[in-house]
Image (tube, grey):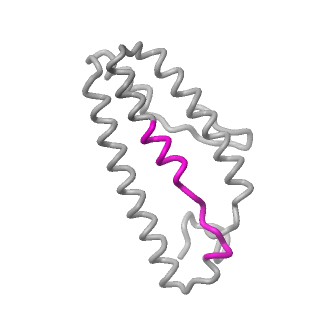
Amino acid sequence: YMMGGGPGPGYCYGDHDGAYRGHHQRWQEYRQQRRTAMQERLKLNAQQQKAWNDYMAVTDKNFNSWKPFSRTDLEKMTAPQRLEDMIGRMQERQQAMSTQLTALKTFYSQLTPEQQKIFDSESMYAPRFHRGGPMMR
C-alpha cells in the first residue's frame, strides 16, 4: 500500500526518525510563533484566556502524541497487519481530533463576533514547508 505516490515499494515506510525530529522541532517553533501572534490579535480577557489555555493543552497533547512509522517495526508485519496498524492510527487520530474540536468549540463560543472573525481568518491556513522550515502561504 502506497501513500503519497512515492517512487517505489515501501516509500511511505521510510525510517524518518532523524528527519522527523528536526521537522517536529521546526513545526513546534512555528506553532508557538503563530500562537503568540494569535493571542496578541485576539486580546483575550481572563475567562477567554483560560479557555484558550485549555484548547492549547489539547492541541499540544495531540501534536506531541503523533509518532512516525518505524520501518523496522513495519517490516516485521504482514501486509494485513500493516493496514490494520494504519487503520488503528487513523481511529486514534479521529478520536484526538474530536477531543480537540470540543475544546475548540468551548473556546470559540467565548469569543466576541469580532474575535471570531479574526480567529477564523488567522486559523484558516496551514503552513507549507520547504527545506528551511515552515513558511506562510
Which is more toward the observer, 53 or 105?
53
70 lies above or below 47:
below
Q: Which of 125/18 is in front?
A: 18
Q: Position of residue 122 (x, y in %)?
A: 44, 26
Query: Is residue 69 rendered magenta in the image?
Result: yes
Residue located at (41% from left, 16% from top): 42
131 to the left or right of 92: right
Q: Locate residue 110: give its quadrant.
A: top left
- Relative placement, left or right, of 112 versus 118 is left
Q: Which quadrant is the C terminus positioned in?
A: top right
Magenta: predominant secondary structure element?
A: helix
Total residue callouts: 0
Most foreground residue, 124 or 53: 53
Query: Which contiguous range is marked in magenta?
Result: 57-73
Q: In the rendered image of this protein, does residue 109 appear above or below residue 43?
A: below
| Residue shown at 42% from the left, 69% from the top | 88
Residue drawn at point x = 69 percent, y = 51 percent: 21
Q: Is residue 60 magenta?
A: yes
Q: Could you tell me which residue is drawn at 50 percent across and 38 percent down?
A: 126
Residue 128 coordinates in the image, percent (x, y): 59, 41
